[in-house]
Amino acid sequence: MFKKVIIAEDIDAMNLGIQQVLKDLNIADYQHSKFCDDAFLKIRAAIHKNEPFDLLISDLSFKKDHREPNIKNGDELVQKVRELQPDIKIIVYSVEDKSFRIKSLFENAEIDGFVLKSLNSIEELKKAINLISSSDKKFISPEISSALQEKNNFEIEELDIKILKHLADGTSQDEIIEILKTLGTKPNSKSAMEKRLSRLKDFFKANNTLHLISIVKDMGII
């Protein structure tokens, strides 16, 4: 079982629920942070003291305060923590249910578990901690595991992310098309660009391009 745990969660009620789970599992050494930057600093400090954390439990969404954060969301936090401490176990505990985002966490940040915040999430979190502490298996909440196994009609591609990043930087669609042509990236026609953006807007339920950029930024996609 894990000996030392850090929780990254900004909602007090959720924090208390996670702490109770740890107490039920006889894990007495834990800390919590309401901000990603603070959680990262604690993890780094623990490594320097030669007393590293065994497990990170992190939400994905964090409310902003008056400070401008260096690490803006849980996606960035788990990625940076994985790079800093490759052997730490990571469980994401979130309301997020979009399969492409969850897949990205498993593939890119190599998280060990994803627990969906729901009516049964406390028990699922206990199961996740028990499973991950005693094996190399991954845990995924049953509500979303089937969705992850299905082949979606539309999946976010690397080209989509590049286009979204260019748009977020203020690059016009015509300029992006020229950039894609210069790089030899296809499709690079105006009609292909418009179709791709239309599908992205539908997928994210965005009213317009600005709304789309705002949504993907908040979700940590760009």
Image: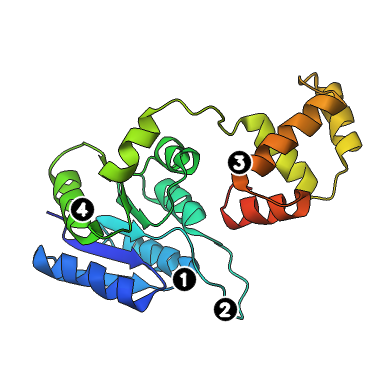
Relative side of 123 to 14, left or right: left
Query: Badge 4 local density, few (<14 within 10 Å), some, or many (20+)?
Result: many
Marks 3 and 1, Cα distance to the nearest angstrom?
A: 29 Å
Identify the disc placed on residue 203.
Answer: 3
Taking depth in this image into account, of 134 and 3 the one nearest to the observer is 134
Q: CA distance from mark 2 to mark 3?
A: 29 Å
Of circles 2 and 3, which is in front? 3
Identity of the residue drawn at 55% across and 31% down: 155
Circle 2 residues within 10 Å: few <14, some 14–19, many ≥20: few
Foreground of the two, 202 or 105: 202
Q: Is residue 112 visible?
A: no
Q: Which residue is mark 4?
A: 124
Specify the label residue 65 is tagged with: 2
Instruction: Select label 2 or label 4 by which is in front.
Output: 4
- Amino acid marked by disc 2: Asp
Q: Position of residue 131 (x, y in %)?
A: 16, 45
Q: Earlier in the sequence, mark 3 or mark 1?
A: 1
Residue 72 lies left or right of residue 11; in this view the side is right
Residue under circle 1? 35
Question: Residue 58, located in which quarter of the rendered image?
Answer: bottom left
Q: Nearer the viewer, residue 53 or 200?
A: 200
Residue 141's disc number: none
Q: Image height check: is 140 above or below 117?
A: above
Kindly state the secondary structure of the residue where label 4 is placed: helix
